[in-house]
Image (cartoon, rainbow, N blue to C red):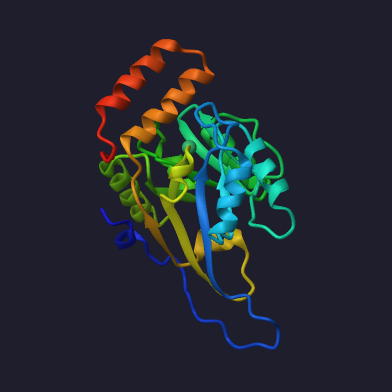
Amino acid sequence: MDYDDDTRSTAGDEASESSETESTSGRRTLLFHVHTHFSFDSWMSPELIVAFARQFKIDMVIVADHDDHRGAERCAELAGEDGPLFPLAAEYKSTSGDMIAMFLNEPIESRDPIGIIEETHAQGGLVALPHPFKYSNFDNEVFRRADIIEAFNARTSDRRNAKAVQIAQELGKPTLAGADAHLKRELDRALNEFEVPDDWDWKRVLTDASRTARVKKTTVRNIRTSAMISAVKRQRPLKLVKNIVRWVQASSTATP
Ligand SMILES: [Zn+2]
């Protein structure tokens, strides 16, 4: 599947009229769905992520650690005033599957999927459903009330990504491509690009602007590597051995 074929405009994309004020329109880039060492299955440092975003001139990064907002917070501190931007965000494990809440003022307490959506919206934030057909069983109401569907996830099978594309199309939801990066070499797996008009803000861009994405699936070995990190961090030696064996068995180029 070529993700670019599935991306589409969800709103008008008129070129901005010339104006006397400085134009802010143009292309903006977003790296969506990145983990740091605050997640149980990553060792990536916030310093490394901020340096990567600066090197490749990425405008915004959604750092979404598992049930932990400290990775996003630390990246924002490191990036300082000049950016790139790191809004407060996390990937919460709801009772029906993972949900990314972003543009938060404070962490989300609820773990009920509708509760997460309502708390996030009460803070003015947005909810995206990452890999919504992997480890998830969301009902229609969750899909309907979520703001964004992750229609490509670099660690998810083509079949499950295709289902995510399909439901986004059926519901008319905007889509994002997620790197789901747990390792440095996964930071380049998905980049979202937007054409923004004058007087734009990021939340409106994420829900309304036309977009394209450059994507590349990760490898089975990368997934096994983060499973090994998880086994070490959680002190599960059997899981570690199992994943070492699977890492050896997997070809270095196979994709999930
Ligand atoms: Zn994730």
Report whether 132 appears left or right of 20.
left
Using the rendered image of the protein, determine whether residue 140 is visible from the camera's viewpoint. yes
Whole-percent x, y for residue 116 in the image: 58, 37
Instruction: Identify the residue at horizontal 52%, vertical 62% (top origin).
Output: 29
Instruction: Identify the residue at horizontal 64%, vertical 35% (top origin).
Output: 108
Foreground residue among 20 and 167: 20
Foreground residue among 13 and 54: 54
Whole-percent x, y for residue 173 in the image: 43, 55
Foreground residue among 207 and 191: 191
Query: Is residue 175 depicted above or below 232 in this figure?
Result: below
Whole-percent x, y for residue 26 in the image: 54, 74
Instruction: Identify the residue at horizontal 38%, vertical 53% (top origin).
Output: 171
Where the C terminus falls, by quadrant? top left
Instruction: Identify the residue at horizontal 57%, vertical 54% (top origin).
Output: 53
Report whether 3 appears left or right of 190.
left
Query: Is residue 212 depicted above or below 144 in this figure?
Result: below
Residue 163 found in image quarter: top left
